Image (cartoon, rainbow, N blue to C red):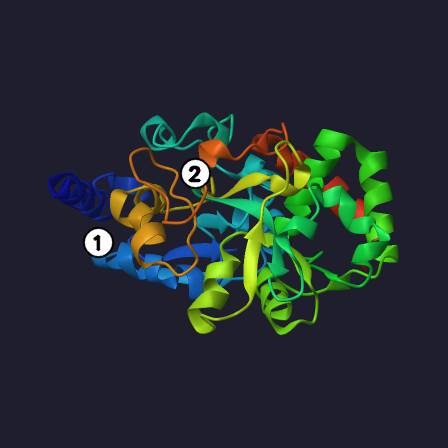
Amino acid sequence: MKGITTIVVLALALLAAGCGGDEAAGGPLTVYSGREEELVAPLFEKFTDATGVDVEVRYGDSAELAATIAEEGDNSPADVFFAQDPGSLGAVDPQLEELPQATLDRVAARFRDAEGRWVGTSGRTRVLAYNTDRVQESDLPASVLELTRPEWKGRVGVAPTNASFQAFVTAMRLSLGDERTREWLEALRANGAKTYEKNLPIVEAVAAGEVDVGLVNHYYLALVKEEQPDAPVANHLFEAGDPGTLVSVAGAGVLASTDQRDDAEAFVEFLLSEDAQRFYVDQAEENEYPLVAGIDPPAGLVPLDEIQGPDVELTAFGAELESTVELLRETGWLS
């Protein structure tokens, strides 16, 4: 296995060095990253160490970066879009080039764009984080829909501006329809759910007892536990097929306007290399799921093939993002 890793790294180094000739500009690779710096900066360093290619990173919210890319058009300085969710990638897929088939084939079809314009790089599932001192596991709801009941009034935390929450709402729209989703969003707001900017502050609020439960991605529990090992927080999975148990991905795509296509494709390939995929298992604090076959998930996580989310296609999320954002505005969650 070590020999395979060495071959992959050497191949990446040769590719990044410009074996494609005219399409490699030789300057720093510009990545727009919707993944937070504290989570993924080590991956960028690993890529530079393996290939010698410097990386300039613009961090921001995935949905906002997607809007920026759309506005910049062919003049975007970005070479790669590394997003938190498939909706943000899909929102700009007309500006993404088709990735090499060998890269796409490293990941199961359900975790990549049907047209090959982006590929999942790590997996996550939506969960309900809960305070174990204040809530008994047996009292937790079987469905996310039950959080609008009176017993949960003022006890729920959400991050409506966050791309992962918007992806979850998109999954609810696709699986239950717009009207049922609208009713749920209005009822949740009327039930006094509290808003936060991101997932991590929600889990910290749950640990502090500000709220009893929060809708987040699974890996934020590990981040809080790293800083507060005794924090009274755990994750709860909703029932099979529930929109609250969406299995989603972070992913990456190459901008068609890049003048460093070889380096950009090498970066995406690197994210799917054994070293990068094992980063999520062995080194990363966030405990995300590797997506490349043959690499086991971090200890303690339910295997992805045992988690049944709603019956939706991730590749459809991009076309639905604008409608999801509009629905969140209409229901008062966004200004």
Tell me if label 2 and label 1 are in contact, CB under 8 Å: no
Q: Which quadrant would the N terminus be assigned to in this image? A: top left
Place of residue 9 in the rendered image (x, y in percent of width and height, measured from the top left): 19, 46
Q: Is residue 68 above or below residue 243?
A: below
Pick the quarter of the image with the C terminus.
bottom right
Residue 69 left/right relative to 151? left
Percent coordinates x, y for residue 243 in the rendering: 67, 38
Marked residue nearer the N-terminal end (2 or 1): 1
Q: Is residue 131 above or below residue 307?
A: below
In the picture, the disc for residue 50 is: 1
- Viewer can see residue 263: no
Choose mark 2 or mark 1, whichever is in front.
2
Q: Which residue is mark 2?
A: 303
Would you call the spot at circle 1 few (<14 residues within 10 Å), some (14-19), or many (20 or more)?
some
Q: Residues within 10 Å of mark 2 (few under 14, many from 20)?
A: few
Q: Amino acid at mark 2?
A: Pro
Above or below: residue 206 compared with residue 246:
below
Q: Tell me which residue sits at (57%, 35%) in the image.
A: 94
Residue 198: give x, y in percent of width and height: 62, 62
Residue depicted at x 86% and y 50%:
187
Q: Which mark is residue 313?
A: none
Q: Evaluate whether residue 289 shows in this view.
A: yes
Q: Amino acid at mark 1?
A: Ala
Q: How many marks?
A: 2
Q: Is residue 282 left or right of residue 145?
A: left
Q: Secondary structure at mark 1?
A: helix
Instruction: Classify residue 78 as left or right of residue 132.
Output: left
In depth, the one of 154 and 17 nearer the eye is: 154
